[in-house]
Image: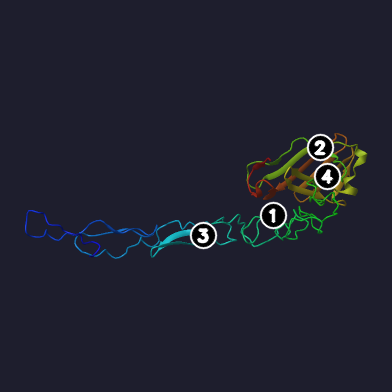
Amino acid sequence: MEVCDVAEFCTGSGAACPVDAKSTGVCRSSAGVCDVAESCDGVNTGCPANGFVANGTPCDDGNVGTINDQCQSGVCAGVAPVCGNGKMEGGEQCDDGNTSNTDACLNTCVTAICGDGFVRAGVEQCDDGNTVSSDGCSATCTIEGAQEICNNCVDDDGDGQIDLRDADCPSSALTLHKGMLNLGKPVLGDEKVSLQGTLTVAPGMINPPVDGAMLSFIDGDGKIACFTFPPGSGWTTKAGPQWTFNKNELSLKFDAKKGTFALTVKIKEAELSDPDAGVHRQRRTSRLVD
């Protein structure tokens, strides 16, 4: 008997069999999100042809590694995300729009970590593909036996302290009034980074024209920004003594008499790398506070 043909039974009051009847119930259940259930039409004995949801209808194939899932001929399927297009899609952990393996996001769109076999610039000294110490590269991706370099904004010895915050380096000659970077006025083309502080050593303890100077902005997570002022002809000396470094839009002034220093950087575009929030490119005023 056809699936849509129902059995007829004698009524017990008449000699003839009742009129042949056809079902209108479901004859084929849905097989998935892109399939529809079919029902008998009440006329024919056979179940209607298998029907599907319209092609292009959004669906979910249950695979976190695909995107743009759509129904096609009764099947829900997506496509693999494109790593390197600057958009986090599918199962990507990150996507910074490049194929570099030396930054925070690998060219497989996986977040860089110690032990992945790629040396992250400015963060790792080495990466031998494991997190085992005593093999030349420590479990924290520092060269075992390395020494801290006190003026390069890098944690050379891997103890979590950078430059003057490391016990291997001398104390800083400066103390900040405020622990923030302030990017100037909200006028395009007039942005600047300004910072003021005090000297914590006697004037005779520093000699910027001979030794140069470096200001680094570091929080508990790591480096935010660094400014380097090399020794030499870039410095001018006045009575006080006062030392001023001017180059293009960069100015650093030490006033030994007042015991202060001031840094000003006029910029058209600032790039500040905050470990908590990634790289920030600023073209208008903003304040970066950690």
Question: Looking at the image, which residue sits at the far front?
Answer: 12
* Amino acid type assigned to the residue bearing label 1 in the image: Ile
Q: Which residue is mark 1?
A: 113
The amino acid type of the residue labelled 3 equals Thr
Contact, CB < 8 Å: mark 2 with mark 3?
no
Q: Which callout, 2 or 1, points at the residue further toward the start of the chain?
A: 1
Q: Is residue 76 left or right of residue 127?
A: left
Q: In the depicted view, which residue is nearer to us: 148 or 184?
A: 148
Whole-angstrom CA distance, mark 2 to mark 4, is: 16 Å
Per the model, the C-alpha gap separating discs 2 and 3 is: 52 Å
Residue 245, x across and y down, in percent: 82, 47
Mark closest to the chain's N terminus, 2 or 3? 3
Residue 83 in the image: x percent, y percent?
A: 58, 61
Left or right: residue 215 compared with residue 25: right
Q: Which residue is mark 3?
A: 66
The residue carrying mark 4 is 166
What's the distance in space between the residues labelled 1 and 3, CA to CA? Answer: 24 Å
Mark 2 vs 1: CB contact within 8 A:
no
Label 2 sits on residue: 175
In this view, the mark in front (2 or 4): 4
Report the residue at 12% width, 59% height from top.
19
Q: Could you tell me which quadrant the C terminus lies in?
A: top right
- Specify which label sits upstream in the sequence, 4 or 1: 1
N-terminal of the two: label 1 or label 3? 3
Dot label at residue 239: none
